Image: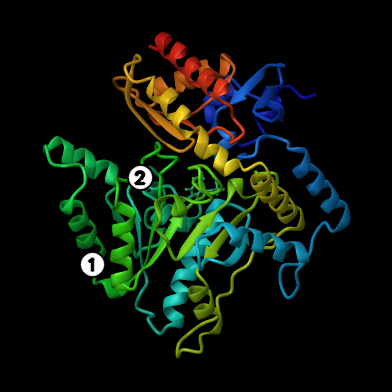
């Protein structure tokens, strides 16, 4: 085998960069809750890979479905034809979406799902003869992938800065409630109240509501540190969008498929958007796949319009509804149901919450946030080196046999939904031990 030094010249992992080259962490195999590294160590996966392997790793049913599919029909052209599994997978996804969101479009990733949803929203308004609705609204601290659409509506300013001048121009960003709340706290006001609703209304109408096509939010922001919406916030957002004829998009790439103990965050919060973006756990990450669920009114308007000035939406990926990906999705959705994994996540949430919150007061811990089976532990920033402390904790946890995720100063946790209480205890116990030795 080539040694890692040779390999690392060819594989271009932009986001892993120098840290990876200095100390490569290579995973060779996986089963259930565990990874095995190339040096033969067993690692408890507290992240479901990257928020995606919700049914646990290398599940026999999914592996068999993919193997069989690849041996039967490896590929079917996307345009002008299809294959039965695409329809079956779509109907199974639609089954667990909120009422009305039963038109499913398949993509290959979360980033593509976001681009797709934004395009559907824009095409919808045009089909209704409202071509002036071109403005898109995202949120600061929002993460919507790495496509140009997702970066444009995303709230990660270094990403936007790198490509400034070449992103979508007609975009605004709501302040994230995490910051508004923080400001409200510091002014001694209640965390959530009329002032926050006013702020939303002000921004949504800033440019004349009739020019706004869509608002996109992660119901719970994941990659930017597990940020939980204040009570009533998503409902209020829904009301404001409905009032102004603006489409609401929930990016559920992380929150979908049981992460919060329900099929979707939409179900968890009791708020129905017009479009939902998904990926990751849709097929347990066995084969790259994403999807968009559109409300049937939105879909039917785009497809059946006939309004003056309406255009067809030309949109499709070569691998949309790839046979192997759809086979994996069907097997995965069957597993979720057969093993009642969403309900399992719901049942485990109190133990998960208690274990996460037991870290309050541990060295460097600034905040603990959680919902369902997702948690974030925010660490105090090390002077002059933001993120360094969380990185050190991540490395030490990995050495101690637990895979956690770090993002900025935050450690994030999103175990497969098959996790048990003993493993939950081990995850947070390891983090606690590690934090005692972090500088
Ligand atoms: N949206 C959200 C909310 C995400 O968390 C992610 C990925 N973490 C994406 C979009 C992008 O997904 P992908 O990496 O599959 O393109």
Q: Residue at x 58, y 36 (%)?
A: 417
Q: Earlier in the sequence, mark 1 or mark 2?
A: 2
Left or right: 19, with 11 as reference point: left
State the image coordinates of residue 17 (x, y, percent, origin top left). Answer: 53, 30
Of residues 248 and 306, the one nearer the viewer is 248
Marks 1 and 2, how far apart in space? Answer: 21 Å
Q: Secondary structure at mark 2?
A: loop
Q: Residue at x 34, y 14 (%)?
A: 363
> CB under 8 Å between callouts 1 and 2?
no
Of residues 271 and 134, the one nearer the viewer is 271
State whether residue 4 is above or below residue 221: above
State the image coordinates of residue 433 (x, y, percent, origin top left). Answer: 46, 11
Q: Secondary structure at mark 1?
A: loop
The residue that mark 2 highlights is 141
State the image coordinates of residue 150 (x, y, percent, origin top left). Answer: 46, 54
Residue 194 in sight: yes
Of residues 196 and 425, the one nearer the viewer is 425
Identify the image quadrant of the N terminus: top right
Q: Residue furthest right?
A: 71
State the image coordinates of residue 99 (x, y, percent, origin top left). Answer: 50, 65
Residue 172 in sight: no
- Rendered image quadrant of residue 53: top right
State whether residue 308 is above or below residue 439: below
The residue that mark 1 highlights is 205
């Amino acid at each position: 085998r080539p040694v890692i030094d040779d390999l690392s010249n060819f594989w271009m992992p932009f986001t892993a960069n120098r840290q990876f080259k200095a100390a490569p962490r290579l995973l060779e195999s996986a089963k259930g809750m565990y990874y095995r590294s190339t040096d033969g160590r067993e690692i408890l996966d507290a992240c479901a890979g990257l928020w995606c392997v919700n049914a646990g790793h290398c599940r026999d049913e999914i592996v068999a479905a993919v193997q069989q599919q690849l041996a039967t029909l490896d590929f079917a052209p996307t345009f002008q034809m299809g294959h039965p599994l695409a329809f079956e997978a779509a109907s199974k996804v639609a089954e667990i979406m909120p009422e009305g969101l039963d038109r499913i479009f398949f993509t290959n990733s979360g980033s593509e799902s976001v681009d797709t949803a934004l395009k559907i929203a824009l095409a919808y308004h045009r089909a209704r003869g409202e071509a002036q609705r071109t403005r898109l609204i995202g949120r600061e601290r929002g993460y919507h992938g790495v496509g140009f659409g997702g970066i444009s509506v995303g709230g990660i300013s270094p990403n936007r800065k790198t490509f400034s001048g070449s992103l979508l121009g007609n975009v605004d960003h709501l302040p994230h409630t995490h910051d508004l709340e923080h400001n409200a706290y510091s002014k001694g006001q209640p965390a959530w109240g009329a002032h926050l609703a006013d702020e939303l209304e002000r921004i949504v109408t800033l440019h004349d509501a009739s020019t706004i096509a869509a608002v996109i939010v992660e119901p719970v922001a994941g990659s930017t540190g597990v940020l939980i919406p204040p009570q009533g916030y998503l409902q209020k957002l829904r009301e404001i969008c409905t009032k102004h004829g603006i489409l609401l998009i929930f990016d559920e790439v992380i929150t979908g498929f049981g992460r919060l103990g329900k099929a979707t965050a939409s179900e968890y919060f009791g708020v129905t958007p017009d479009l939902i973006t998904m990926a990751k756990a849709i097929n347990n990450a066995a084969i790259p796949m994403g999807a968009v669920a559109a409300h049937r009114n939105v879909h039917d308007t785009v497809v059946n319009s006939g309004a003056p000035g309406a255009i067809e939406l030309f949109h499709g990926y070569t691998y949309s509804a790839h046979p192997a990906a759809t086979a994996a999705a069907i097997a995965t959705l069957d597993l979720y149901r057969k093993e009642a994994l969403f309900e399992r996540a719901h049942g485990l949430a109190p133990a998960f919450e208690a274990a996460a919150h037991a870290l309050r007061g541990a060295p460097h811990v600034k905040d603990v946030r959680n919902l369902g089976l997702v948690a974030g532990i925010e660490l105090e920033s090390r002077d002059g080196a933001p993120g360094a402390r969380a990185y050190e904790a991540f490395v030490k946890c990995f050495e101690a046999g637990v895979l956690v995720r770090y993002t900025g100063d935050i450690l994030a946790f999103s175990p497969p939904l098959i996790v048990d209480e003993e493993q939950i205890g081990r995850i947070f116990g390891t983090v606690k031990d590690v934090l005692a030795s972090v500088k």
